[in-house]
Amino acid sequence: MEIEEQVINIQGVDVALFRSQRAKRLNITIKPFTGVRVSVPRSVSFKKAKKATEQRISWIKSHLSKMQKAEGLFTVFNLDTEFQTRAHHLDIKVSSTDTLRCVVRDNKIAVTIPHANQIADAKVQNAIRKAIENAWRREAKDHLPFRVEALAAKHNFTYKNVAIKNAKTRWGSCSFDNNINLSLHLMRLPDYLVDYVILHELVHTKIKNHSSDFWQLLDMVSGDAKKLDREVKAYSIKIY
């Protein structure tokens, strides 16, 4: 039987090789709390994948070091963590079952774990984060489209559609045909900065670049646009 996943150690670094149906080439990813993972196409043996990964170990160590520093900025959830979104609060409990379970219901992000000593595991931490992001997604869908509609009407902008995405590189974007994409992580920002990001994208429905004309119009509808822009940049979209 063909191996689907294998953990190897290269110069003290644990690397997870896993078979991928979609991968067309070897792809190395290093993410917080998940470590180093290498997707291996069906056409490549694990032996060849290991050799290729060994050749990239210096690069891996360099990026892993940066990622480990970044991990120190993330919340490490435990049974006593008090975490609140706009409309939900996190509730972590130990259950007698053997199943990790995360449910967003009413105003609660309910997480049950089989054993208290497992809460620091990457799998549990990532599951908690996914549940929190699901709560933010619900809140974003309830709030952001209506805010876009209100601000567009107030300032005479037109747009096509609003989509909520789990974007972690940009707070928002506007397509060439005026579809507006907003990150669910906007729900972490204060209302006035949420409005600023929305206005930023609405201005892009008229001006597709960041020219002086763009900033002049954005300043007209938002107030001190450059100051607000600096405030948004003070937040990390990836780290919470």
Image (tube, grey):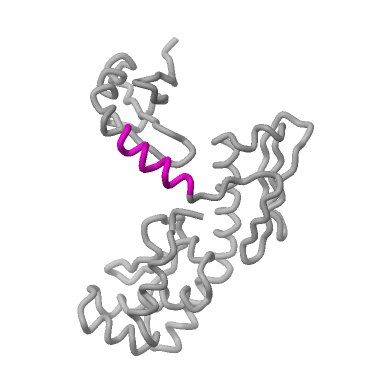
Residue range highlighted in magenta: 61-72
Main SS category, magenta section: helix
Q: Where 109 sits versus 13, above or below?
A: below
Name the residue rendered at 66%, 65% in the picture: 87
Residue 240: where, in percent of width, then height?
Answer: 51, 55
Q: Where 21 sits versus 135, above or below?
A: above
Reply yes or no: does residue 37 show up in magenta: no
Name the residue rendered at 37%, 81% in the picture: 158
Residue furthest left as drawn: 211
Reply yes or no: does residue 65 show up in magenta: yes
Residue furthest right as drawn: 96
The quarter of the picture where residue 58 lies is: top left
Residue 48: where, in percent of width, then height?
Answer: 27, 17
* Horizontal arrangement in the rendering, residue 216 relative to residue 121 (left or right): left
Location of the N terminus (image quadrant): top left
Q: Where 104 sits versus 65, above or below?
A: below
* Horizontal arrangement in the rendering, residue 125 relative to residue 161 (left or right): right
Nearer to me, 191 or 224:
224
Name the residue rendered at 55%, 65% in the picture: 141
* Horizontal arrangement in the rendering, residue 175 relative to residue 144 (left or right): left
Residue 176: where, in percent of width, then height?
Answer: 27, 68
Name the residue rendered at 50%, 72% in the picture: 145
Residue 36: where, in percent of width, then height?
Answer: 39, 32
Q: Where 43 sits versus 94, above or below?
A: above
